[in-house]
Image (cartoon, rainbow, N blue to C red):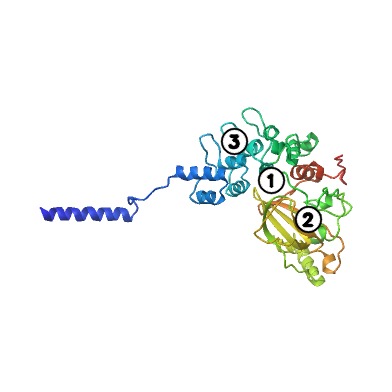
Amino acid sequence: MLRIVLVIGIVVLGALFALFTFGNVALPSFGPQTSAADVTDDLFAAAEAGDRDAVAEALALEAPADARDPFGRTALMIAAAAGRDGVATDLLEAGADVHAQDDQGRTPLMHAAASAPSATTALLLLNAASDPHLTDEDGNRALEHAAANAPVRSSGLFARLQELTEFPESLRALRGGEAFSRDWPAGYLVPIEDANLSSRASHLPGAPRAYRNGTHEGFDFYDGTVSVEIAYGTPQRAAANGVVIRADVDYADMTEAEYEDVIRTARESLSTPPEILDALRGRQVWIRHPGGFVTRYAHLSGVAEGVVEGIPVQQGATIGFTGNSGTIEAATGTQDDPHPHLEIWRGDETYLGQGLEPAEIYALAAQVFGTSALPPFTDSGLDFR
């Protein structure tokens, strides 16, 4: 009998070993366990407290960025209501939906407008392309929520939010009736204080560049076309809050021979090769912004002190100085024709204004920079006065 029991025991142990080995049975665990619900609750608590490390830990444990609490709120909504800009930025980086709506129909922008202790949170969400035209179950938009929150109502952002919400019909018409493009941000600044966009179509994205078989990808700000003086060394500012992802601190201008070789290569191509176009942008600073957007500042004469890859920058901070690097003027040793050149990219493939006519570009730029950035009139016959 003992022998039979031993044989049966050996067989059972062997079977259990095989099951454990091939993953069909889970080994018992005697330590404390963290459930998915616990991790999600931790994410909500960290979002409200503004604890970026705890948010990162919860996301690393696979807490869904758009998980919902009992009121249908996401962590981004909770962070927005509490004015936790750092956490909101991290959640946007993790893919949180800026247009999600809770059980009352409120978006993160509405939560920020209604409850945040300052206007910076609402600006952050507009920078991430949050649509201010959405309404909650009572028909209120972010604008109506902001009107009841003194810190936002008394800020400069309120006028910008009102303008976006009540976007001029004339500009809507130029965009086929579209009131807001969720593909692009809002609340940005132009790089030169008090400047407007150039009145010339040749200074806009999409303009042809025959000398190099290519297309312009940014906005140029030349003296005499943008309402303020543009000189060599004029400070340039960050269009929005973000993180520097490129800063050409050690840039050296091309020689005249090098410039001619670059242009020769471009002309021999069907379109300007990316590496050639990068050389022709000269000294640059690139900034990554909430929502996956990147601004590129080109032709700089210098980079501002302390602006290096990896540092955060605030909207309006000086990031560099106007120059002509990457041009024939710089290659020949002059300071002629200095001009800021700003590009706005969504991902690596699409720049603001790509494939659009000048009228459409101006109408879209009014969303991004505000109607005050539009020129009084343009060489294509548009009159914005």
Q: Which mark is residue 101?
A: 3
| Horizontal and vertical percent position of residue 127 | 69, 45
| Horizontal and vertical percent position of residue 340 | 80, 56
Residue type, label 2:
Gln
Q: Mark 3–mark 1 contact, CB under 8 Å?
A: no
Q: Spatial distance from mark 3 to mark 1, Cα to Cα? A: 18 Å
Residue type, label 3:
Gln
Residue ranking furthest to the right: 224
Q: Nearer the viewer, residue 53 or 72?
A: 53
- 233 relative to 148, above or below: below
- 293 relative to 233, above or below: above
Q: Secondary structure at mark 2?
A: strand
Callout 3 crowding tier (Cα within 10 Å): few <14, some 14–19, many ≥20 = many
Residue at (56% x, 48% y) in the render: 51
Quarter of the picture containing the C terminus is top right
Residue ranking furthest to the top: 138
Q: Mark 1–mark 2 contact, CB under 8 Å?
A: no
Residue type, label 1:
Asn
Q: Which residue is mark 2?
A: 236
Residue at (74% x, 64% y) in the render: 279
Q: Earlier in the sequence, mark 2 or mark 3?
A: 3
Q: Secondary structure at mark 1?
A: helix
Q: Which mark is residue 328?
A: none
Callout 1 crowding tier (Cα within 10 Å): few <14, some 14–19, many ≥20 = many
Q: Which mark is residue 127?
A: 1
| Horizontal and vertical percent position of residue 286 | 70, 57
Q: Quadrant of residue 38?
A: top left
